[in-house]
Amino acid sequence: MTTDLLAALNILVLERLDVDSFSITGTVPDWLTHFCPQKVVLETGRLILKEVFPFLENFLIDAEEFWLLRGEKKLKSGIWYQLDLSGKEYHFEAIAVYVDSKKYLLIESLDETYTEKQYIIQKARENELNYQYIVKENQKKEVLIHCIIHDMAGQLSAIHGCLSLLQFENLTQQVRDILEIGKIQCHRQEMLIREILDGFSAEVKSLETFAVDLGKAPSALISAQDIIQLLSPSFALNKMQLRLAANIDVTADWRVIGDESRLNRVIANLVENAFRHSPLESTVTIGLEQDGDYILVSVDDEGSGVPPENVESLFQKFSQGKGKSGRVGLGLYSCRITVERWGGKIGYSPRPQGGSRFWFRLPKPRRNESVAPQEGATQL
């Protein structure tokens, strides 16, 4: 019964009699007669294996050692191909086993299995090529976007310069107010362009080894105050407030591992994000907390919060909230790349009273390292 089943599975069962000589056990698979005359198979029931399958000559040396050691597992020959008497190609694999003090050799025809494996391998190769093609095409598009945005930045700087020159002219108050709005809008566009460029550069820099200069460790408090000073006019224009949390000890050491300009950009990105998603006459608050060996920076707003289905993709490249067309979704992605590069972590959590909290933690400089003193911060 067992040998019939093995034959149905295209497996030839051979029992070793002596060196190079094997007896056929049980039912003979149909394919065997394609490699040796039928009378040899039916009349003698014995095979000089290396005459029928020359490939196995070297494998039988290893098999003899395996049987001598009475191996408990199995020894495989690996796949080989061979032409039958008519020139048709077959694929085989031999397995040496030791069962009930007997030495067996199983030879399996792999035609169907081999074809399926080759098909799978071929499809995998095609998918890999398609993937590489898509990656290269995306890289081309990213470079193109980078170039376009870079050119836009030059034109926008010229516009900003013209607006700045106009403020020295003899203008009415109404015109000055309109001019101020134009400058604010120009500033916003500059921030957006910087956001896009930072997204590309941060991804490249994240692959580089980061070496921090502890003597120039930036203060999270000073960075927060700088951003409040920079963005407060935009908030005021929309009847909103941007403030520092009231419970912050300005005499404490708020220095973190990182780079001052990049730290400012991270905080600015989070504040701008809160600004875009907050209602009029609301408040955005920047908080700072000592968290063991880390400094925790948070930005709280009073908006509607982030829909649950968007939370997981918040910090991915080109992730955008619904109804936010015109933005590329690189701000939070840039923040994540930067913070993680410095050994920190960034995240989002809904506020119990409503609104969003975006936060990040950065490690403090180690105490046994020399850190240059910084100018003291002042409460805004």
Image (cartoon, helix red, strand yellow):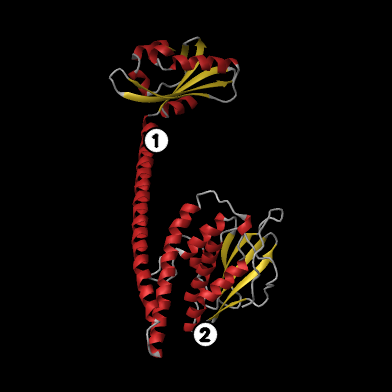
* Total tally of numbered discs in the picture: 2
Tag 1: residue type?
A: Lys
| Image coordinates for residue 132, horizontal then vertical, percent | 37, 46
Name the image quarter holding the C terminus. bottom right
- The residue tagged 2 is 281
Please tell me which residue lies in front, 9 or 211. Answer: 211
* Label 1 residue SS: helix
Please tell me which residue lies in front, 305 or 36. Answer: 305
What is the spatial separation of the Cα atoms under label 2 and label 1, in whole angstroms? 65 Å
Above or below, comparing residue 68 to residue 326 in the picture: above
At 38% from the left edge and 73% from the top edge, which residue is drawn?
161
Q: Residues within 10 Å of mark 1 (few under 14, many from 20)?
A: few
In the rendered image, which quarter is residue 218 located in? Answer: bottom right
Specify whether residue 63 is in view: yes
* Label 2 residue SS: loop
Please tell me which residue lies in front, 15 or 117. Answer: 117
In the rendered image, which quarter is residue 122 located in? Answer: top left
Q: In the figure, is residue 316 to the left or right of 65?
A: left
Q: Residue furthest left?
A: 86
Specify whether residue 313 is in view: no
At 62% from the left edge and 72% from the top edge, which residue is drawn?
287
Tag 2: residue type?
A: Glu
At 35% from the left edge and 58% from the top edge, which residue is drawn?
147
Above or below, comparing residue 196 to residue 241 in the picture: above
In the rendered image, which quarter is residue 173 located in? Answer: bottom left
Please tell me which residue lies in front, 209 or 50. Answer: 209
- The residue tagged 1 is 117
